[in-house]
Structures are given as C-alpha cells and as structure tokens.
Amino acid sequence: MPSTPLRQNELINAKRLVVKVGSALVTKQTDAGPGVDSSAINRLMSQVIALIEGGREVVLVCSGAVAAGCAELGLHERPKDLAELQAVAAIGQRRLMALLHTAAKKRGYAAGQMLLTRGDFDDRVRFLNIRNCAAKLHELGAVPVLNENDTVAVEELRFGDNDLLAAMMTNAMRADALILLTSVDGLLDKDNNVIDRVDSVLDAQQHARTGMKSSWGSGGIKTKLDAARLVTEAGEVAVVAPGTKKDVLLKLMEGEKIGTVFAPAARKMDSRQRWIGLTARPAGTVSVDDGASRAVRERGKSLLASGITDVTGRFMRGDVLLVRDSQGKELGRGLTNYSADELALIKGKRSDQFAKLLGREGYAAVIHRDNLVVLGA
C-alpha cells in the first residue's frame, strides 16, 4: 500500500512527538579525531523549536555523549571497558547538553536534561514520573532532552540503544509519533531500495537489511525495528528517516514522502496497557496450551491455571509475566495473581483444587483479563 495517506493522516495531525537523533548525526570526524558537530545541533534544534512553535510538543532523545567525551579527551575510538565508557560519557554529556542548551536559548527556549536507565521504566511509579516531568518541561517552555544514563547503567539496566529509550518514551508520553533520524535513507530491502511503508514489523525484520551501524553508535537498523514494533503495537506511527536531509523533521510533519513509515496497529493502548505489555520487563514466563491460547487471544478471556503447562523465573504476585503459546511464540504479558512457587503448585489444575494445594483460597484467574495485554492482536 502507498504511504502517502498514512503520512498525511498520522504525521500531519500528530501533536506530540518523540524524535531520536543518532550519534552519527551530531558528531563529525576531523584529522584530530571525533568532534561534536555544533552546526548540526543548531539545525536540529531549529527544526524542533519550529515544530513546537507550530503547536506540537516534542521530546528529543539525543545520542552522542560518548563521542563528545572522546573528542574532549582526544580518544580516537569508542572505549570498550565499562568504567572508561562511563567516565567518557560523563564528560561528553555535559558538552552535548551545553551545545543543545545554547542552540535552544538562541530561540528563546531552554533544554531540560533527563538521564534515564532501563529500571526507570520497569517501575510503574517512576514510569509515570518520567511522563509528568516531560510534560512540565513543556509547560515551562523547555525542550526535554533525554539520553541513557551511561554513567550508572550496567548491563541489566541498559536499554542497549537510545532507539529503545525513544520508543519507551513514546509510549510513556502516549506520543502520536516516533521519528528515528539516522544516517541512512530509511529501511532498505536486500536490493538497497528504501522501503516506503511497513505494515508488519515482524515481516520487515525478516526481509530488510539489518546489519548497518555507525562506528560511534551502539545500535543499528535492528534496534530501530525493535523500537518501531513497540510503538506501532501500541497504536502509534513510527518513521525511520535520513537526518542529513535538510529540514527533514519539518518535511516529514508536512506529510512528505521521506524514509520509511511504519503503520500503527488498529487499536490504541492506554498508558497502563503500554506499561504492562510493552515497557516493564517480565519477571517470569508461563507457557500455555492451545485451548488457553485461543481463549485469551480470540475470546478475550482471563488466563487460568488449567491452561498453563510450564512456569519459569522467580517472581512475586503483581509482577509482569510473559505468556507464550504452545509454539513458544509471545502471546502477551500480564500481572500475575500468584508467585512462582504458588504457580508451580497449581499449574494445570482447576480452581476448585487451589485451596487444598495452597492451604488457602485462591484467585480463579492467574492473570485477569483486565491485567492482560495480548500482543500482535
């Protein structure tokens, strides 16, 4: 299907945006090594503020702290040691924010820094606080600028790339669109042609070129596809577009055919569904039989213990669980009414057997349908 109607319907009317800019777009290579491209940052901020003055809210996710730190320290390669990487990011983040703030101040705005880790999105209260802080920055006439907090992030707390941070922020803000600006023209097929429109991210992951990655960034096309899936699954549009094209943000929001647009799912998730189904990391996994899978997916039923065939992980009541079907495919995610130990006792059993097995009365549903988000519906 052509992308023009989708772009005109979704992007022209979008009022709240998350824009992610990769490291390659805000840094430059010189004879002396890497450096921050202040001209590129000025052009970027000029577009962001033009969108804001046009009545839109924009959250900017800007990579480049490590590259900026390397420039100040005279390093010619991205560090591999974790401690050195964190130290370089600490130096570079200050430099990056100074340039972003200066660019915003020239146009009568401030830049508000928000440094986040993966764990900030796992916790429901902190998830809501992130949204509230960004909203207040908009009210105060500031541009929220996000980056991963590399100085404290360790492997289990990392997003892995700012593409995923941007996608989660899109869902936290319930933004209308995610714009991923990159150094390539969009999502490419195996013949190096730009794919204009993607209706299925899962299909695109099988057929698109996914190996491209800049020397200073930590992601690539693969993480952009992962990010697009998180956003489109929630019912919003995503775009991968060339950040080097003049006024690319302004042209995209006018509906111009640039880059690759990812069509949203028909349903729109509310904030709570987005946190359960697409944001919080599961503490455990349950596998279900075909009968339970059909009841959940096709009839919108709660997940019962009688349909559960396997339980893995250590979790407590109220944690998010990943639900897999009999083929091992992700069916959905939901909040459990039972701990891992309790669920190991009652899996495959009827609810009238729970009292004897648990020594107390139990809930009829392991995951109630109100706390269950079916994915890929």
Image: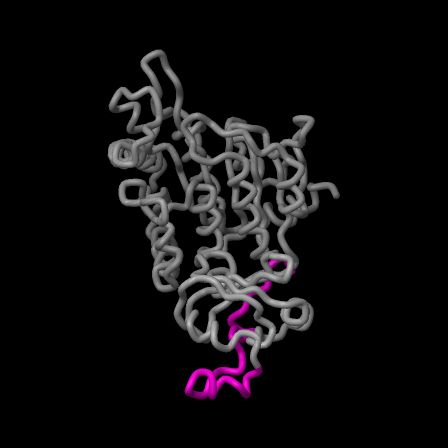
Q: Is residue 287 left or right of residue 169?
A: right
Which residue is at the front of the view, 120 or 202? 202
Image label count? 0
Which residue is at 58% across, 38% downward? 252
Which residue is at the front of the view, 296 or 97? 296
Q: Is residue 111 left or right of residue 214?
A: left
Which residue is at 52% across, 37% downward? 249
Residue 373 in the magenta stretch? The answer is yes
From this viewpoint, which residue is outermost toward the right?
Answer: 1
Residue 304 in the magenta stretch? The answer is no
Image location of residue 315, percent across then percent down: 40, 66
Please say if 355 is above or below 369. below
Which residue is at 28% across, 34% downward? 98
Q: Quadrant of the C terminus?
A: bottom right
- Chain part drawn in magenta: 350-377
Which residue is at the front of the view, 105 or 237? 237
Colour convention of the picture:
one colour
Image location of residue 1, percent across then percent down: 75, 43
Please say if 228 is above or below 213. below
Which residue is at the front of the view, 288 or 186? 288
Please say if 39 is above or below 240. above
Report if residue 358 is visible in the image: yes
Which residue is at 25% across, 23% downward? 73
From this viewpoint, which residue is outermost toward the top?
Answer: 31
Please say if 207 is above or below 140. above
Image location of residue 112, percent across then percent down: 31, 45
Could you say which quadrant of the image residue 74 lies in? top left
Report if residue 246 is visible in the image: no
Could you say which quadrant of the image residue 139 lies in? bottom left
Image location of residue 76, percent across then percent down: 33, 19
